[in-house]
Amino acid sequence: MLALLFQSMRYVFFQELACGMLKYLANNDNHKRKEIAMWPNINRWEHRMNPFAELDRLQRQMNQLFDSTSGRYRVSDFPAINLEGNDEKVHVTAEVPGIDPANLDLSVTGNTLTIKGERADLDQQEGDVLYRQERPVGRFMRTIRLPYEVDNSGIEARYEHGVLHITLPRSESTKPRKIQIQC
Amino acid sequence: MKTQDQLAERHEQGLLENRENESSLPKYVPATDIYERNDRIIVLIDLPGVSEKDVDIDLEDNVLTIKGTTHIVRQEGVDRLYQEFCEGRFERTFTLSADIDRTGIKAKMKNGVLRLELSKAEKAKPQKIAIQAG
């Protein structure tokens, strides 16, 4: 009984600690958070239905925290992306310098876009002396939730100066329809 | 919290006011790899979104400065939904040792990565010294 109480207290303590850390991060990053808040939360109900959604989110954010410090394999923060769009289409821009476009793998399912790829290791040869290595290498993957489902056949992608530009048109079935009200 | 909001706002305002003035764009330090192979030093610099003509390579005395500017073309009639990177300047300075042959610097830009090849000056190349018997 006592052990159980201790366990649950420990859990609460951990949660408090994690929340505090996240709040600290959020405060530090205020400018960015404001932008995120503009993101239309279309899956609002999903969160209500799933009692563990909050925990999942916490878990994900904790993972991101550690991913960004582990260096070699970046899952969450590479490549950096920008998103802009309107009711008709959405544009995704991603900074992926130094990658052969043939090694980039884009896939779309419903309203999620996944960018996968591998940045080749330095073409190191025997006898090379390495002074500085800051550019990230290795495999990366990033999944982006789009504000609506997109038309798979109309997606255009272009790679220019190390930046990937993707244009995704909204699928016809999810476009808003004006409904006439009869009196 | 409040002050941070204000700071962010002021920062944004400043950016908008000085958009014309390039020097006020946020400055980034690009990630760089440096390695030595045979008699050459190879420098790789990530400059995503920078085209060949927007890169400036300056050599003054033995200080090598690389500058680049990104230009993000905003689409008409779309809203910004989420942003992680913005227009800016890349700038990085390296001090070369005196043993670099200044005339033999090669620069190449591909897929947003700048590759510089510096060759070592003749006098810095290792020389075998023959020992005479006697």
Image: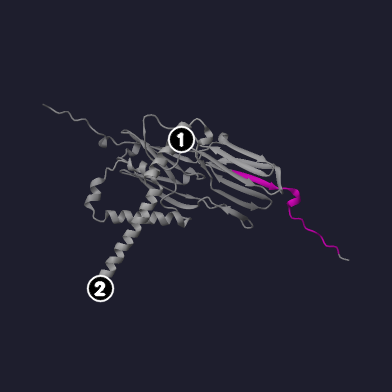
Up/down of A60 relative to B81, above or below: below
Q: Position of residue A75 (x, y in %)?
A: 42, 52
Cα–Cα gap, marks 1 and 2: 58 Å
Asked where in the image residue B51 lies, by quadrant, the reply is top right
- Residue type at tag 2: Leu
The numbered mark 2 sits on a residue in which chain? A
Disc 2 crowd, CA 10 A, few/some/many (<14, 14-19, 20+): few
Name the residue rendered at 82%, 60% in the picture.
B130
- Residue type at tag 1: Leu
Name the residue rendered at 38%, 42% in the picture.
B5
Is B95 in front, or is A14?
Answer: A14
Indicate which disc residue A2 carries.
2
Q: Position of residue A170 (x, y in %)?
A: 31, 36
Q: Which residues are magenta?
A: B115-132
Q: Which residue position is annotated with label 1?
A: B15
Disc 1 crowd, CA 10 A, few/some/many (<14, 14-19, 20+): some
